[in-house]
Amino acid sequence: MFCVIYRVPSVTRLVFMSKKDDFSRVPEVLLKGFGKPQLAMLLPLDYK
C-alpha cells in the first residue's frame, strides 16, 4: 500500500491520497479551489 502525497500550488497545503491520480473521493468544490495538484511523493506503507 502507498500513501500518495500531492502538493497544491494555489495554497500551502498537501493532499494525502491512497491511490495515485484518484481524486474521486475529493469533493469537486475542493478540487476547484486547489488548482491542479502536483505529485510530491509516494510513501510505501508496509504491514507486518
Image: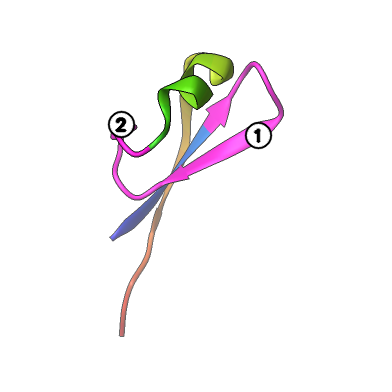
Region rendered in magenta:
7-25
Q: CA distance from mark 2 to mark 1?
A: 17 Å
The residue indicated by pointer 1 is 13
> Picture coordinates of residue 35 (x, y %)?
53, 14
Out of 39 and 22, give the one closest to the viewer.
22
User: Would you say 36 lies left or right of 13 here?
Assistant: left
Residue under the point 42% across and 23% down: 28
Asked whether the viewer can see residue 20, the reply is: yes
Secondary element at tag 2: loop
Height in image: 2 above or below 46? above
The residue indicated by pointer 2 is 21
Residue under the point 52% across and 25% down: 30
Kind of residue at badge 2: Asp
What secondary structure do most residues of the magenta stretch adopt?
loop
Height in image: 16 above or below 29? below
Asked whether the viewer can see residue 37, the reply is: no
Identify the image quadrant of residue 11.
top right
